[in-house]
Structures are given as structure tokens and as C-alpha cells.
């Protein structure tokens, strides 16, 4: 007995240093999370120099220089632009920049003012990089226009012209004529007509901000025109507020009014036009577009006589690609892709035009894959195939016939960089098992690879075309060391099968001092929107990490309708958004409640935007598994949301009344169970505060108690000043009150 006691004492003494080390680790603080103290270092704004496969550029942190780097070594080569040394430079810092197609001129943006998610105005300047016989550049800054800030400037292919939009009209600057400026369109008017820039719903849901293109020979300019005069207006109040403060609204609030087409309502009428730069003749294409159809992109091919026009019907289940003659205006259909559900918006930017071919992605096989077409619309070959998804087309090397792309082959939780040659030989270029993205040099000899996994913050390397690492630019070693100083919860993956026989993927975070003999409260985080993925093999430290450090188990499950697992899994929610997704979150809560370390009576759920909608739908599903939930910036009824997104997944309310009724949080509000906190910004141009206000009124009339937090003048992101800290403190206190 004495010997046994001695052995036990020895084991305790051996374990003591580890226990003491754990006790010495720092506790996470909420302000550290909100202020980005654990944000992984990355590299932003990398721009390969056009026509130069050996170098890329990046602006420095304070926006005063554009620096040229070697793709081979990652080392600085020279400073291309410096506000301190440039001649006649009227600004002290800048916000962004771009190159002319030949790499000979910089277009520098200053005084940037955001409009919506992707649109902004800025004052732009030209800076020539061309060198004289002595190897020196002119070093002079030239203002693009004296007429006021510009939107979406674009160079002509020869670099001698720049087209831009101001006040919904298109202007043209000719550099060879002393930067002379002429006006291409004159009918632009706010909330009526837009030329060359998309309206709100196109920008938000088709993910772009410019709709004008030069022909390959720089002789023609094509643009899309939106007539939104028949679209109904939406308005929301603007108050004086703080951070920022608006003096003009000190006593009487103002209002922001813009055109926002809601499901089943009128959209803008769209047409495509061409402008002959020499003759100044404007023509409208004879495009056989449905009266309520969409034009999500236009692109000139390498043939100046072939303008590609992408169209969708209003149901968004038929994609047509036309090649139009910009002078005769005749349009020829070269490709049609149809589905019983919808065409994903990611299709558009994966279409690239080459000398005699173009790339195209489609889910026609059940999984998103890459296809190679002749310009006459004939399928040359299918580039990728199998039960995996191509996530992004990265480019095509015309010299050796090699395609580059990322895919989730091997696991829906991971992404890798691949190439396949003209013989179909496939090579994996990224080494790390996790999430990989790549940016290639213009000649595909090098690429920057960004890698992360569940436990690894970004590692960014420069690689050659075989995948060999040439140098490491970012390793986040400092962040890794910092993390070791804290009692940091870590994620782990899990899978389970629902009562319907569906296997779902999830991740879980347990407290750093997790004790399997205890029962913990759970907070489930999710987004759940169509095609989204929250369960990925990627590193992050977030508010959820902080809550795990406070004694919660955090879990996230991607239910049916989410991405990465093929069209059937993703599109099974078509016409009935919110129903299967909510059921799967309830099933996840039931599964978690069966674990011996979970207190099934203390499970909460939260989400933002679609995730907020899903919180409401799940808490009202009819199975009372959630004790508390937070819905931030939530859609509450698809009648309140925009045409392109809502109808993509639901068609119109007139066509699908039963689907809209079943998908409404109002319809099941009488079954709401648990403590609810509604959060919304009053200036949300995306998911309008109307969603929150009307749903709150409905709960009042049902006699349902709830909490509510409104943020003055905040948009869908709910940030600015102390707002984010206030928001996450509110969430923390709410869950502590109801789940602790």
C-alpha cells in the first residue's frame, strides 16, 4: 500500500508542471477578439504586372508607395511610385491602383467614397511608367478628370484611353490628345437610368461593379444600360448619429432613397449598346432577351468583332451566351446551359476568352466542372470530371495548353490548387491539406499559394509552376507563438447522421480546460445559405473562440443546401428555402444533446443575415431544443428581399405562394420557443430593417416576449466606432444570462 501511494504521489508530481503551465496561460479577452489581436497576417492587393511574368506589385501599408517584387525571390526590386518623390503629386496617400493592359501606366485612386458593397467613387490620377532613353520615367502625376470623382475607370487595350462613369453617364479620356474628355452618354440620372454601372440588385447579387468594355482593337466601347424608372423605391431614415456624425440631420432626420426590386416586383430594363469611338455612333444590340431577363456580364473576346453577352431568364435556370457584332448589332447564340433549378452566379467570372476558345463551368454532371468550347459554341472537351467541385478557374496557359484551377477533390472541407495539361494529365500543385488559393504570374511560371488549415494560420509561399516552394513570404510564426500564451480552444471536426439518413459535417470547439465528466452549455453558430460553407479546414479565431474560452461548447453544422457536396445536396432546398435547413439545425442540436458532456437543456443558436433567418426558422421549427437564440440582420420573409437572390432559389411569390409561406419566419412564429434577441441596423440597404420591425410587431401581437437591439445608421455589416464591441458584448451577456 505504501508503495502504491508513492507511485501515485510521483505521478501527481510529474503532472504538476503541466497543470501549472495550463494555469499560467492567459485568458482571452473580448476586446482582443473584436479588435483583431489574433487576426492572421496575410498579403493583400497583389497585382501581377501585365506582360511581365517575373514581377508583381503591392502598395505599402500606409498607401504612399507601390512596390515591385520578384516572383522568384519575393524580394523588393524597386519602388514604382512614391507620393513623396512624384512630381506635381497633390495627394499624400492613395487607396488603390491598377495597371494599363500593357503595364505602362498606373491609375491611382484617392478620396475613395463607398456607395454599396462593391461600388465607390474616387478621384483618379494617371502615372506613366514608360522610360526614356536614359532609363528614367517622367515621374509626373496627372489628374484623370477635373469634372469630379469617377466610378469604375477602365483602360483601353492600347492604354491610350480611359472610360469611366460619373453621375450615371459614361465619359472618355483620350491620353494622346492631352487627356481630352468627352461624354459618351447623356441620359444618366439617379434612380432612373444607369450607363456602364449596374443597379443595386445586379451589383449585390451578380457580384460586379462595372458594365463597360473596350474592344480588342480599342475602337469600340460596349456598355449595359439600366432603365430603373419602373422599379419601386425603398427608403430608410438617416439620423445625425455619431462616428460618423451628420450635422444636417441634427434636428430633422433625412432619408436615403434608392431603387430596390423585391421578389415578384419589376426589375430594371436592360439593354446593351456599343459606341464607335471614331464616328461617335451609338448602337443598340439586337439581343433576343426576355422582357424580364438579366444581363449579368458583357465581355469583348480577342476578336474585336465579337462581343460576348451573357444572359439569364428571370428564373435564372437558362444561361445563354451570345456573340454580337458591335457594328451590325447582330447577336448569335453560341452556348445555352439549362437546369431544373438555377445557374450559380460563380459561372460568369469563370468564363474566359482565348484565341479560338473559351472556358465554361457547369453543374450539368451533378458537380461543378470545367469545360472547353470553341468560339462557335462546340464543346472541345470536358477539362475536369468526378464527384468533386471545381471552386475557381485560375487561368489557361496558351503556350503549353495547361489549365489551372482549385477544387475540393478528396474532401468537401478542403481545397487544393491543380493543373491539367492538354493530354489530361492532372497534377496537384499545393502541398498542404487544408484550404489553398493561388495567384499566378501572367506567364504561369510562378504563383503565390495561400494555405491554411484548422490549426494553421495563413502560410503564404512563392512557388514555381511545378508547385515547388521557392520562398515563404508569410508564416504567421508570431501569431502561433502568441496563441501558445493563451488558454486557446481548438476546433475539431465531427460528422453525424440525421433521422432522415443525411450525413452532415460539423466542427466543434470545447473549452481549453474541457472535462468530459461535466455537462456544458452549447452555442451553435451557422450561416446555412445556399452554396455557403462554414465547415472548412481553415484557421480562425473569432467571438465563438472567446465564448468557448468562457465555458461553452461551440458547434457549427453545414446542413442541406450548403456547398461543396454537389448540386443535389445544395439544390434540394429549391423553392422551399429555410425548411430543410432549419430541420437540420434542430437535428444537430438533438445530436449534440445526446453527448454525455452536453447539457441538452442549455443549447443556443445564432447567425447573421441568412444565418439570422435560420436562427428564427430553427427556433420555430416545432422541436423545442433551443433555449436561446440571436438573429442578426435577419431576413424574416422572402417577400421583403430582392428579386435576383430571392427568385433564384424561390421563383416569384406569384408562382410559388406555398413555398413563400412555408419559408416565412412569420408563418411559424407562433411556435417560437426560447429566449430571442433580434439585432438590426437601421441603414441596412441589403436586408432592410423592415424585416426586423415587422417580425417584432408580429411577435408582440402573438404575445411572444423577446429582446431587441437596434443600431443607428448602421448597414448590413453593423460596424463603426464602438459598434462591434457593443454588439458582441450584447451577444455575450445575452447567452450568459440564458445559458449559464
Image: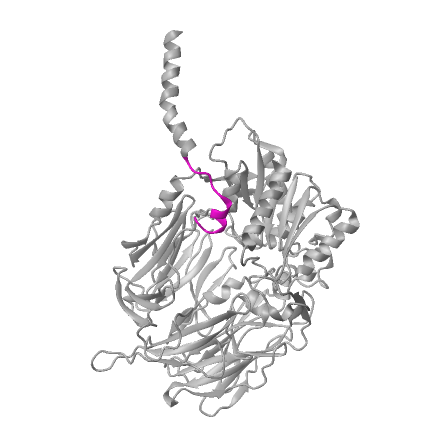
Residue 555, above or below 598: below
Residue 553 relative to residue 404: left or right: right
Residue 208 lies, in percent from the top left, at 51, 68
Residue lying furthest bottom in this view?
A: 279
Residue 648, above or below 566: below
Q: Which residues are magenta?
A: 25-37
Q: Nearer the viewer, residue 215 or 511?
A: 511
Residue 158 relative to residue 464: left or right: right
Determine if the magenta segment contains residue 584. Answer: no
Quadrant including the C terminus: top right
The residue at 63%/42% (across/down) is 586
- Res 680 visible: yes
Residue lying furthest left in this view?
A: 134
Residue 478 lies, in percent from the top left, at 35, 47
The residue at 53%/63% (across/down) is 345
Q: Nearer the viewer, residue 689 or 49?
A: 689
Residue lying furthest top in this view?
A: 1
Determine if the magenta segment contains residue 30. Answer: yes
Residue 84 occupies which quadrant of the picture? bottom left
Main secondary structure along the magenta-highlighted residues = loop
Amino acid at each position: 500500500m505504501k508503495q502504491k501511494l508513492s507511485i501515485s504521489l510521483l505521478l501527481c508530481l510529474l503532472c504538476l508542471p503541466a497543470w501549472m503551465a495550463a494555469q499560467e496561460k492567459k485568458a482571452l479577452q473580448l476586446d482582443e477578439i473584436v479588435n483583431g489581436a489574433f487576426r492572421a497576417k496575410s498579403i493583400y492587393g497583389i497585382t501581377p504586372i501585365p506582360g511581365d511574368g517575373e514581377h508583381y506589385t503591392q502598395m505599402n501599408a500606409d498607401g504612399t508607395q507601390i512596390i515591385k517584387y520578384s516572383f522568384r525571390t519575393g524580394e523588393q526590386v524597386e519602388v514604382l511610385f512614391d507620393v513623396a518623390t512624384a512630381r506635381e503629386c497633390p495627394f499624400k496617400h492613395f487607396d488603390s491602383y491598377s495597371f494599363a493592359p500593357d503595364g505602362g501606366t498606373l491609375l491611382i485612386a484617392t478620396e475613395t467614397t463607398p456607395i454599396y458593397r462593391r461600388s465607390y467613387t474616387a478621384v483618379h490620377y494617371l502615372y506613366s511608367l514608360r522610360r526614356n532613353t536614359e532609363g528614367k520615367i517622367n515621374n509626373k502625376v496627372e489628374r484623370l478628370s477635373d469634372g469630379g470623382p469617377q466610378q469604375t475607370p477602365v483602360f483601353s487595350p492600347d492604354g491610350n484611353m480611359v472610360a469611366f462613369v460619373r453621375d450615371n453617364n459614361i465619359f472618355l479620356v483620350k491620353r494622346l490628345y492631352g487627356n481630352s474628355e468627352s461624354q459618351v452618354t447623356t441620359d444618366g440620372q439617379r434612380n432612373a437610368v444607369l450607363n456602364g454601372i449596374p443597379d443595386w440588385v445586379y451589383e449585390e447579387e451578380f457580384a460586379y461593379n462595372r458594365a463597360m468594355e473596350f474592344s480588342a482593337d480599342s475602337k469600340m466601347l460596349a456598355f449595359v444600360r439600366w432603365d430603373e424608372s419602373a422599379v419601386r423605391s425603398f427608403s430608410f431614415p438617416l439620423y445625425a448619429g455619431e462616428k460618423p456624425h451628420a450635422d444636417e440631420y441634427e434636428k430633422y432626420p433625412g432619408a436615403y432613397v434608392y431603387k430596390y426590386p423585391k421578389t415578384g416586383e419589376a426589375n430594371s430594363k436592360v439593354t446593351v449598346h456599343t459606341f464607335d469611338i471614331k464616328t461617335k455612333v451609338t448602337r443598340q444590340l439586337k439581343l433576343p432577351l426576355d422582357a424580364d431577363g438579366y444581363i449579368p456580364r458583357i465581355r469583348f473576346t480577342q476578336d474585336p468583332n465579337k462581343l460576348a453577352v451573357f444572359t439569364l431568364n428571370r428564373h435564372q435556370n437558362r444561361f445563354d451566351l451570345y456573340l454580337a457584332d458591335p457594328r451590325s448589332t447582330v447577336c448569335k447564340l453560341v452556348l445555352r446551359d439549362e437546369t431544373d433549378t438555377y445557374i450559380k452566379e460563380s459561372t460568369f467570372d469563370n468564363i474566359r476568352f482565348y484565341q479560338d476558345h473559351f472556358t465554361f463551368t457547369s453543374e450539368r454532371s451533378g458537380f461543378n466542372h470545367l469545360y472547353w468550347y470553341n468560339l462557335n459554341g462546340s464543346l472541345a472537351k470536358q477539362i475536369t470530371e468526378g464527384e468533386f467541385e471545381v471552386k475557381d478557374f485560375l487561368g489557361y496557359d496558351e503556350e503549353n495548353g495547361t489549365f489551372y484551377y482549385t477544387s475540393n477533390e478528396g474532401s468537401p472541407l478542403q481545397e487544393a490548387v491543380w493543373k491539367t495539361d492538354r493530354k489530361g494529365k492532372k497534377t496537384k500543385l499545393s502541398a498542404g491539406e487544408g484550404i489553398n488559393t493561388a495567384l499566378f504570374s501572367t506567364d504561369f511560371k510562378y504563383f503565390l499559394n495561400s494555405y491554411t488549415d484548422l490549426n494553421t494560420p495563413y502560410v503564404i509561399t512563392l512557388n514555381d509552376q511545378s508547385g515547388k516552394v521557392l520562398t515563404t513570404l508569410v508564416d504567421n510564426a508570431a501569431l502561433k507563438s502568441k496563441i501558445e500564451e493563451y488558454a486557446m480552444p481548438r476546433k475539431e471536426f465531427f460528422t453525424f447522421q440525421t433521422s432522415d439518413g443525411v450525413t452532415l459535417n460539423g466542427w466543434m470547439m470545447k473549452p481549453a480546460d474541457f472535462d468530459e465528466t461535466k455537462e456544458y452549455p452549447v452555442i451553435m453558430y451557422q450561416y446555412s445559405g445556399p452554396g455557403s460553407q462554414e465547415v472548412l479546414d481553415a484557421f480562425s479565431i473569432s467571438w465563438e473562440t472567446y465564448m468557448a474560452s468562457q465555458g461553452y461548447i461551440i458547434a457549427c453544422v453545414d446542413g442541406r443546401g450548403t456547398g461543396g457536396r454537389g448540386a443535389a445536396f445544395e439544390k434540394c432546398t429549391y423553392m422551399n428555402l429555410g425548411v430543410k435547413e432549419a430541420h437540420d439545425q434542430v437535428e444537430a442540436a438533438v445530436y449534440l444533446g445526446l453527448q454525455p458532456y452536453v447539457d441538452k437543456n442549455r443549447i443556443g443558436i445564432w447567425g447573421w443575415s441568412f444565418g439570422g433567418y435560420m436562427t428564427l426558422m430553427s427556433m420555430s421549427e416545432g422541436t423545442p431544443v433551443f433555449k436561446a437564440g440571436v438573429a442578426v440582420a435577419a431576413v424574416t420573409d422572402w417577400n421583403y428581399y430582392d428579386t435576383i437572390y430571392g427568385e433564384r432559389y424561390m421563383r416569384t411569390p406569384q408562382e410559388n405562394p406555398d413555398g413563400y409561406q412555408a419559408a416565412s419566419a412569420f408563418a411559424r412564429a407562433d411556435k417560437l420557443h426560447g429566449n430571442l434577441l433580434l439585432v438590426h441596423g437601421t441603414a441596412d440597404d441589403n436586408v432592410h430593417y423592415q424585416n426586423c420591425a415587422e417580425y417584432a410587431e408580429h411577435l408582440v401581437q402573438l404575445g411572444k416576449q423577446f429582446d431587441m437591439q437596434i443600431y443607428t445608421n448602421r448597414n448590413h455589416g453593423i460596424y463603426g466606432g464602438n459598434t462591434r464591441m457593443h454588439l458582441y458584448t450584447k451577444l455575450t451577456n445575452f447567452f450568459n444570462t440564458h445559458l449559464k
